Amino acid sequence: MKKFFLIIICLTVIVPLALVGCTKAATTTSAGNVLNIGAVWGLTGTDADIHGVMAKGETLCEAWINSNGGITVNGVKYKINVITLDTKSTTEGAVTAAQQLVFQNKVKFVTGQPTPAEVLAVRSITDPNKVFYMAATSDNLSPDYPYSFTALYPYKWPKTPLYDYLVKTYPNVKTVAVMNQDEAGNVASGAEAIVQIQKHGLTLGDHEVYPFDTTDYLPVVTKVVNTHPDAIDMCLNMPSHAALIVKDARQLGYKGPIFGGSPWDPSLMLSIITPDYANDFFWPTFDPTAPENASQVPPEMSTVMKLWDDTYHVPFVLDCLQGWNALWTTTQAIEKANSLDPLTVAKAFESMGTIDTGYGKSPIGGKQTYGINAVVCEPIPITRLENGKTEFEGFSPLNIP
């Protein structure tokens, strides 16, 4: 539990918020040329814990880029200045934040947000105003929105390797119950679960859709467990809530495999679930701090981990890479375009083929699937809790056509 409390302490440290007032996207000061980039995260409200980690990752990336000389565009060096605004974990707050960044701060580039409804809210402001937007995660991509991209694959894509792993590791599983919140990302994850169940020759058992603001999961977990499925796919959730779902199921006597689709921190999940109930639970994540996983850590991730340790002095949380990658991929696209024009940068990003991330060099895809090369396709890791310990099962390469 000590590590859990350290993480919570880390999350409550204030992330720099808005620079109030009207600024220009790129300015020249006595310190040199500065490129302002907007960022949107839910720093208060329901998303604050995990978004705080992501924002901290972006702050690290900003400092790292600047310590290495900034970026170069048309022979001019620019230091990065990230203007971070709080969406308050609401769509209204996301619209307000995006409006301030676009109309007051005059930024031409915005990053952040993994929550589907808030991503759409930000995009409703950025895209019509021709502002480049790199969401931390987005599952709503289209050529109708040529300025909008995602630094991490959409929520449905881990489903294939997760179900591959399920049928390989648990060959006796025949029926799978699905439970998801009535929220856009969760609904998409639940729909994809049904597709994968069919593709893998399995049978869909109970399918429960429950309110997004649920805090007591015991009633819905009890209902699912009482249908006696061979496995439970819980789809997406906040880390502590997902852990409580697992714990509730185990305390009810359920012994089958349970799995989810979010990249929750393994140590955090284990600390909440507790070793007594930590069996046959797997999800798309990786613990790079575990000594036994040292050989699997990409060099780029090692860089982020060291900066995190040197800066925050609390245990590393993998989710910080969502903030790091959102900013790093944006700046790489700007340098590739050799331009500060958002449309030129957008076209350059679409043509890059691969890009550097905290997981190493990753493909950019989506043209066939979404009509636009808008997705950074990091490899998908799988970790399992077994016998009260975490076990890393490996990375699955991802290419989205």
Image: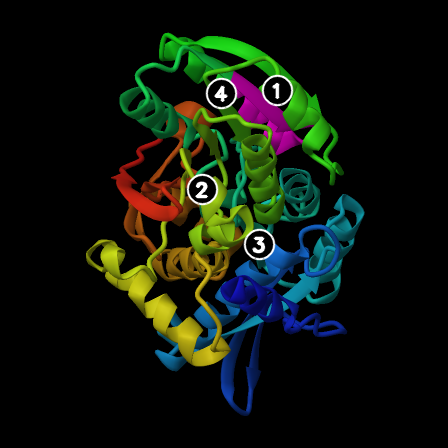
Secondary structure of residue under mark 1: helix
Which of labels 1 and 2 is toward the front? 2
Image quadrant assignment for residue 393: top left
Disc 2 designates what residue?
Answer: 278
Residue 88 % position (x, y): 75, 55
Say whether residue 331 is left or right of residue 271: left
Left or right, 388 with respect to 96, comes to left
Position of the C terminus by quadrant: top left
Residue located beneath label 4 in the image: 193
Of badges 4 and 3, the one in the foreground is 4
Determine the secondary structure under disc 2.
loop
Image mark for residue 224: 1
Which residue is tagged 3?
112
Asked if residue 297 can be seen in this view, the reply is no
Give SS at disc 3: loop
Foreground disc of the pair 4, 2? 2
Q: Is residue 190 magenta?
A: yes
Judge whether residue 276 can be spotted in this image. Answer: yes
Answer with mark 4 or mark 3, whichever residue precedes in sequence. Answer: 3
* Three-letter residue code for mark 1: Val
Mark earlier in primary sequence (4, 2):
4
Q: Which mark is drawn over residue 335?
A: none
